[in-house]
Amino acid sequence: MLFATVSRGKNAGARLLPHRFQDNRYHVHLGKQGPYIPVSDDRELPSYLANGYSLKMSSPEARNPVLVSPQSIQGWSPNSKEIFFPIFRETFFPVL
């Protein structure tokens, strides 16, 4: 489960989750400005984050989405083995 925590401002400590827009998709951006890429399946989001894309996220209370960088998002790993094979990670790729 992807999430981020607000670190400053009046909503400090609030948990942000990926924001699903009215088109029933998530939006990822390569920069702060410019076009977004719509993503239908939330299971695809970690691969975009691993490639440097930022994700629009919001809290359930305040539905205004904000752009969050991949470094600030928790619940995923940039290691491709964990992105594509999370079930087999410990079996085939033991942590040393």
Image: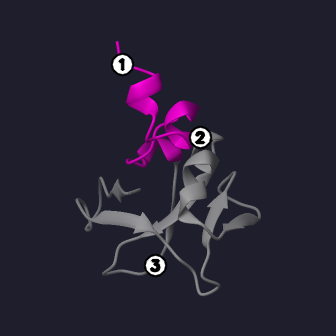
Residue 79 x, y percent position in the rendering: 52, 31
Tag 3 and tag 2, C-beta contact below 8 Å: no
Mark-to-mark CA distance, 3 and 2: 24 Å
As shown in the figure, which amino acid type bears the numbered disc 1? Answer: Val
Circle nearer the N terminus (1, 2): 2
**What's the residue at 27%, 67% (across, down)?**
11
Indicate the secondary structure of the residue bearing disc 2: helix
Q: Is 74 left, or right, of 82 in this rendering?
A: left
Q: In the current view of this chain or complex, which residue is farthest to the right?
A: 35
The quarter of the image holding the N terminus is bottom left
Left or right: 28 in relation to 11: right
Read off the magenta span. 70-96
User: Which mark's residue is nearer the viewer, 1 or 3?
Assistant: 1
User: Which callout, 1 or 2, points to the residue nearer the camera?
Assistant: 1
> Which residue does the numbered mark 2 point to in the structure image?
50
Residue at the far bottom in the pictured view:
22
| Pointer 3 residue | 64
Residue at the image point whose x is 29% and y is 63% from the top: 15
Residue, disc 1: 95
The answer to which image quadrant residue 2 occupies is bottom left
Question: Which kind of residue does numbered mark 2 sit on?
Answer: Ala
Question: Within 10 Å of the Cα at label 1, are there few (<14), some (14-19), or many (20+) other Cα atoms?
Answer: few
Circle 1 — which element?
loop
Residue 82 among magenta residues: yes
Question: Is tag 3's residue or tag 2's residue first in the polypeptide sequence?
Answer: 2
Q: Earlier in the sequence, mark 1 or mark 3?
A: 3
Give the CA separation, mark 1 to mark 2: 20 Å
Task: In the rendered view, tell whether residue 6 sits above or below residue 46.
Answer: below
* Residue 59: x %, y % from top left: 35, 73
Residue in the foreground of this view, choosing between 89 and 41 = 89
Q: Nearer the viewer, residue 37 or 14?
A: 37
Q: Position of residue 78 (x, y in %)?
A: 52, 35
